[in-house]
Image (cartoon, rainbow, N blue to C red):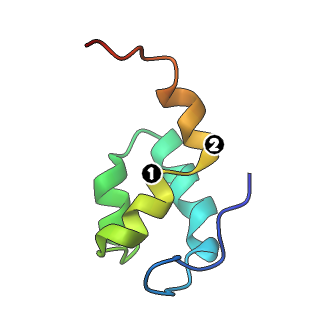
Amino acid sequence: MLMPVRCITCGKPLAHLWEEYKKRVEAGEAPGKVLDDLGVKDMCCRAMFLGNVELLREVAVHKRTS
């Protein structure tokens, strides 16, 4: 799945960071630390990574409890 080229809120370029982020998280690093190392500090930009459709499939297996 392609990452949006820029953050929808602030306009910071993000797509070039997706492959590095994905590789490091799959290797076992904490997602928050990887985003910090890549310079993704703003919450709007971090949400672009964590809200990616590719990751939503992983989250969707967890059922919501009321």
What SS does tag 1 mark?
helix
Q: CA separation, marks 2 and 1? A: 9 Å
Residue 63's x, y, as percent? 41, 14
Three-letter amino acid code at the position of disc 2: Glu
Can you name the residue that lies furthest to the left here? Answer: 66
Q: Nearer the viewer, residue 65 or 11?
A: 65
State whether residue 51 is above or below residue 41. above
Question: In the image, what residue occupies the spot 41% across and 38% down?
Answer: 28
Residue 51's x, y, as percent? 49, 51
Residue 64's x, y, as percent? 36, 17
* Residue 1 falls left or right of residue 55: right
What SS does tag 2 mark?
helix
State whether residue 3 is above or below residue 23. below
How many labels were placed on the picture? 2
Can you name the residue that lies furthest to the front here? Answer: 66
- To which residue does mark 2 refer? 54
Question: In the image, what residue occupies the spot 52% across and 40% down?
Answer: 26
Q: Nearer the viewer, residue 18 or 63?
A: 63
* Discs 2, 1 touching: Cβ within 8 Å: no
Question: In the image, what residue occupies the spot 59% across and 63% down?
Answer: 18
- To which residue does mark 1 refer? 50
Residue 7's x, y, as percent? 52, 77
Q: Quadrant of residue 16?
A: bottom right
Three-letter amino acid code at the position of disc 1: Leu
Position of the C terminus by quadrant: top left
Q: Nearer the viewer, residue 34 or 10?
A: 10
State whether residue 18 is above or below residue 26. below
Dot label at residue 6? none
